Image (spheres, rainbow, N blue to C red):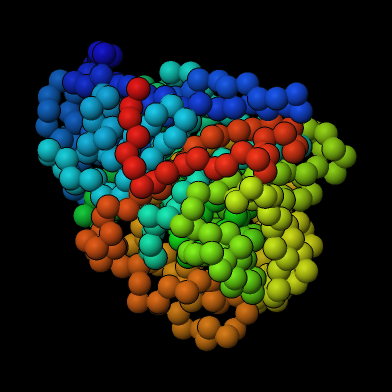
Amino acid sequence: MRVSVIFAGAAAQQVGSQKEDVHLPMTLNVCTQSGCEAQKKGVTLDANWRWLHKVGSSSNCYTGNSWDPSSCPDPETCASNCGLDGVPTEDWASPYGITSDGDQLKLGFVTQGQYSRNVGSRTYLMDTEETYQMFKLKNKEFTFDVDVSQLPCGLNGALYFVQMDADGGKSKYEGNKAGAKYGTGYCDAQCPHDVKFINGEANSKDWTPSPTDPNSGVGHYGTCCAEMDIWEGNTISHAYTAHPCSVDGQTRCEGKDCGDDTSGDRYNGKCDKDGCDFAPFRLGNSTFFGPGSSFILDTTKPMTVVTQFITSDGTDSGELVEIRRKYVQGGKVIENPAAVSGGSGHVSISEDFCSAAKKDFGDVDAFSQQGGLKAMGDALEKGMVLVMSLWDDHAAHMLWLDSDYPTDQPSTKPGVARGTCATTSGDPDEVEKDHGDSSVAYCNLRVGDLDSTYDASRAPSCSAGQMSVVV
């Protein structure tokens, strides 16, 4: 266990000492054309999900969706008073609903623990006990197996990369005493305001509890960085999306720079919130992905997902010019389908595809405004952190992924239809009540040289339908 000491006048995000912190085991296979080497890594839980309490006491600093006013009268005092505590072995399965057997990570949706009810989760792959695994993916490919068979409409099993700091901001921000070990430093291209600690300070200024989410709220600040969504999906629909930003790495934002929808600044911020997405259903192919043998990719069974980052000159330092996708299922390699509408004929994310899709769909081309693939490649070259998560959507009910969106536009308009889920689906209250036993499984993580991480003869092996054992 780790003991936290507070010095007089200190204003720092502390570490609690009431629970041991244990990282779940996870294997990363690093591949070349000669074969793959299995490396033992770990998984940590994001700080937002952890117990935050007054140091030296079991009194909560944050309960439900509100800060405790006595412990947190202001951000600096809150940071000095409150500590993030560990996640011991027994807490991973309950209350967090997360298990691992070393090769597979399974995330449960709703778990009722002894003291609290947990909804969803966000986890990170670790390199060491104190640092995240950093992925530099230009001229490389990243591959994983996934089972989304237990994810209905309104849920999103998301695996993606974000440009977080390797140590979670511990060395950059004097106030951050917890670091990557405790899941700090999150950021993404949505510049989220619900992150409880940003830059080592509590995000309690102007905190407004969510009217629909009993566990969340929004603070004055957001936290921005480039994001590469390798996979967002459920049984009905999926997408992979590049979200470049004009900021370099994790950056705290406020006001217009956050690009908040509530202020009408979505396209005035520092990141491309829409991204350039390759979503087969949205691009006119309704038979590629779905539940059952009538689809080319059958979501009732696990599949292997391969993402390749192609550079202009075939080197790790060349400019990123294309992001390709392949799948493996049923003993064969399945190529990404060509877009039918929105960049018709394109089979991957490229500058030409992104420009054509934005034009055909009538979308604002924030992708180009934020630097496009070059900016995305710059982030990938510097290194990004792997996130594995499961969540529901209080803002838009996940309709942007699996239904018609925006809902005030006809489904016949190009780009509006994104899946077969009803526009009335995805309400978190209903999804949590009716599908609380949902889960997603990620396994067989692999990274390496192009065309070195997959094989048609190797069957995907994830299973979201059975509980794995923590070792």
**On screen, residue 311 above or below 23:** below
Residue in the picture at 26% in, 13% down: 1
How far across and how far down the image is residue 207, in percent? 28, 51
Is 176 situated left or right of 315 in this image?
Answer: left
Work out which quarter of the rendered image holds the C terminus and state it. top left
**On screen, residue 87 above or below 257:** above
Residue in the picture at 78% in, 32% down: 316
Is 431 situated left or right of 249 in this image?
Answer: left
**On screen, residue 312 above or below 285:** above
**Camera-side residue: 11 or 100?**
100
How far across and how far down the image is residue 408, in percent? 46, 83
Is 70 situated left or right of 16 in this image?
Answer: left
Q: Residue furthest right?
A: 313
Residue in the picture at 60% in, 50% down: 329
How far across and how far down the image is residue 369, in percent? 69, 59
How many marks overall?
Answer: 0
**Camera-side residue: 359 or 45?**
45
Residue 47, can we see it? no
How far across and how far down the image is residue 228, in percent? 59, 47
Residue in the picture at 28% in, 14% down: 2
**Camera-side residue: 255 or 5?**
5
Residue 357, can we see it? yes
